[in-house]
Image (cartoon, helix red, strand yellow):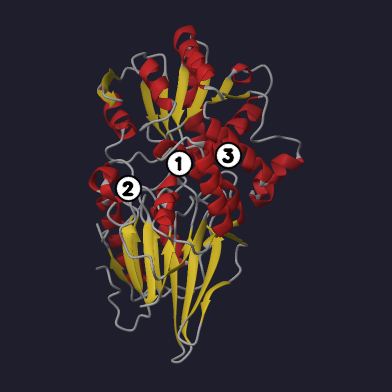
């Protein structure tokens, strides 16, 4: 069991997912034998899903002490096991930010349709139950989860800059009888610096224990100007070839950031340029719904985005933007773009090409060198996206839904559009704390990323003469 190694600690941390890989985030903070918190409850994807396939179908750990579920953000690898958690009997509060509370029902409805049922009545019943348990919180305000003679648990959410509504979680524990205190911080997924739309995360003042994501713990992102130029070049190359740029992107977060950046490129290109005739197609009903909610939540956008709006621009609803709703129109769009040579940019889920409408575009266009596949997000090991990314430049092949497809289309990767902080961003998150953690537990990363980040944190701690122990925990309870 992944117990806290410090004898003076008030808490124990157990990882039910997200520690042995990059997906399935689920961390239990145990304060005593009667009280615990659950931070996220996500699905496994790619190789993580293959290794923990049984864990996808159940919540097989004791939830009797869980006083609340705290959701850092609504990506499926952080919330996808929520239906199983409720089925296991969890009826406590579900704490999340106010924007996440608006987005969560859309994510859960989609997850139910894919993995459970398409029965509208059952879906509405489940969503009503989620709504009943949801407790939307303001950022930067303490919320009391428990207050008893034996223990006080307070939770505070802070902006994480990953997707709209994303948070890192500060947990303050106190034993009234002994006056012992402990501050535990769960990073969730931290956003990259200078990301479109959202302000960058600011470090907490202190942490005794930090559970830190390590997705990009072994690399640095390109600067925003450089990645915007790469995006522009990749699209212009496909335009010159009279082809389509296929961008696999998750429906929430990445899609909206790309639309924001594309609106900026089109605006700067001016009238009369080739960009003015380019169609930007979002082929995902779910992404279209998320984009609408993003528009409704403008108060949570960053200052730069607010300035665009005040200047009369519409970063997520511009003239060249088209959305595809029905499956029939989707199929027509795939055929038309594959055959016509009409230049277009298509943004479609899933982000790792493991399912969804993007697969049909890939089947139709991977064999044609006119087209371009542009990756702007992390591709998990064992996913078709990783295979295309790895073997495409060599003229290799990929398996899509049981069939082999040769890769003749261009393949480009722009790391700077990751919604995750890079190594420097993660180190800065620690460095800017006034009170550094005595212990850091690295999660949500492959082994190489975690080991590299561990070495970098230890070097930084030595340089600043700080005492920090870095652990690489594994998932338990399966």
Q: Quadrant of residue 385?
A: top left
- The mark that comes first in sequence, 3 or 1, is 1
Report the residue at 60% width, 20% height from top. Answer: 275
Residue that numbered label 2 is attached to? 56
Of helix, strand and loop, which one carries label 2? helix
- Image quarter of the C terminus: bottom left
Disc 1 versus disc 2: distance between alpha carbons? Answer: 13 Å
- SS under mark 1: helix
Instruction: Examine the rendering and report whether any part of residue 258 can be seen.
Output: no
Q: CA distance from mark 3 to mark 1?
A: 17 Å
Q: Please, is residue 261 above or below residue 430 in the view?
A: above
Residue 399 % position (x, y): 27, 25
Numbered badge on residue 155? none
Which residue in the structure is indicated by mark 3?
Answer: 290
In the displayed orientation, state which residue is furthest to the bottom: 177
Residue drawn at the location 60% of the way across and 49% of the way down: 102
Sort mark 1 into few (<14), some (14-19) or many (20+) by Cα contacts within 10 Å: some
Residue 422 percent location from the top left of the image: 41, 51
- Give the alpha-carbon distance from disc 3 to disc 2, as whole Å: 25 Å
Which residue is under mark 1? 112
| Relative image position of residue 364 (x, y in whole percent) | 39, 15
Badge 2 density bin: few <14, some 14–19, many ≥20, Cα 10 Å: some
Is residue 116 at all visible to an observer of this figure? yes
**3 vs 1, front mark:** 1
Query: In the figure, is residue 290 to the left or right of 192?
Result: right
- Dot 3 and dot 2 residues touching (CB under 8 Å): no
Q: Dot 3 lies on which element?
A: helix
């Amino acid at each position: 069991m992944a117990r806290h190694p410090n004898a003076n600690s008030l808490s124990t941390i157990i990882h039910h997912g997200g520690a042995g890989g990059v997906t399935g985030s689920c961390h239990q903070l145990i304060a005593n034998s009667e009280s615990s918190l659950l931070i996220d409850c996500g699905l496994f994807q790619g190789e993580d899903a293959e290794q923990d396939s049984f864990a996808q179908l159940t919540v097989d750990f004791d939830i009797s002490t869980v006083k609340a579920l705290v959701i850092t953000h609504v990506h499926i690898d952080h919330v996808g096991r929520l239906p199983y958690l409720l089925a296991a009997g969890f009826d406590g509060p579900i704490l999340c930010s106010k924007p996440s509370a608006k987005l969560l029902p859309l994510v859960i409805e989609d997850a139910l349709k894919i993995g459970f049922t398409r029965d509208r009545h059952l879906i509405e019943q489940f969503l009503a139950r989620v709504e009943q348990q949801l407790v939307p919180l303001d950022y930067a305000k303490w919320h009391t989860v428990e207050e008893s003679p034996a223990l006080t648990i307070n939770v505070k959410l802070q902006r994480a800059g990953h997707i709209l509504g994303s948070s890192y979680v500060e947990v303050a524990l106190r034993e009234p009888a002994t006056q012992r205190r402990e501050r535990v911080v769960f990073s969730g997924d931290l956003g990259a610096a200078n990301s479109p739309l959202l302000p960058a995360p600011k470090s907490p003042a202190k942490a005794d224990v930090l559970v830190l994501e390590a997705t990009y713990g072994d690399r640095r992102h390109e600067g925003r100007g450089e990645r915007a130029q790469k995006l522009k070049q990749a699209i212009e190359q496909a335009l010159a070839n009279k082809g389509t740029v296929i961008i696999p992107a998750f429906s929430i977060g990445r899609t909206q950031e790309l639309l924001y950046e594309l609106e900026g490129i089109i605006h700067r290109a001016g009238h009369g340029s080739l960009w003015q005739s380019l169609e930007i197609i979002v082929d995902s009903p779910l992404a279209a719904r998320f984009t609408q909610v993003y528009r409704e939540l403008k108060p949570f956008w960053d200052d730069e985005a607010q300035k665009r709006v005040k200047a009369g621009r519409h970063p997520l609803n511009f003239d060249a933007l088209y959305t595809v709703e029905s499956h029939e129109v989707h199929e027509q769009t795939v055929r038309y773009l594959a055959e016509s040579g009409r230049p277009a940019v298509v943004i479609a889920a899933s982000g790792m090409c493991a399912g969804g409408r993007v697969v049909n575009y890939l089947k139709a266009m991977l064999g044609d060198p006119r087209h371009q596949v542009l990756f702007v997000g992390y591709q998990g090991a064992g996913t078709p996206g990783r295979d295309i990314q790895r073997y495409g430049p060599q003229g290799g092949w990929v398996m899509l839904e049981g069939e082999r497809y040769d890769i003749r289309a261009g393949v480009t990767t722009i790391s700077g559009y990751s919604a995750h902080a890079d190594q420097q961003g993660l180190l800065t998150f620690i460095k800017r704390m006034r009170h550094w953690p005595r212990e850091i537990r690295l999660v949500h990363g492959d082994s190489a990323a975690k080991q590299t980040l561990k070495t970098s944190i230890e070097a930084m701690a030595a340089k600043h003469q700080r005492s920090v122990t870095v652990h690489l925990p594994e998932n338990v309870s399966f």
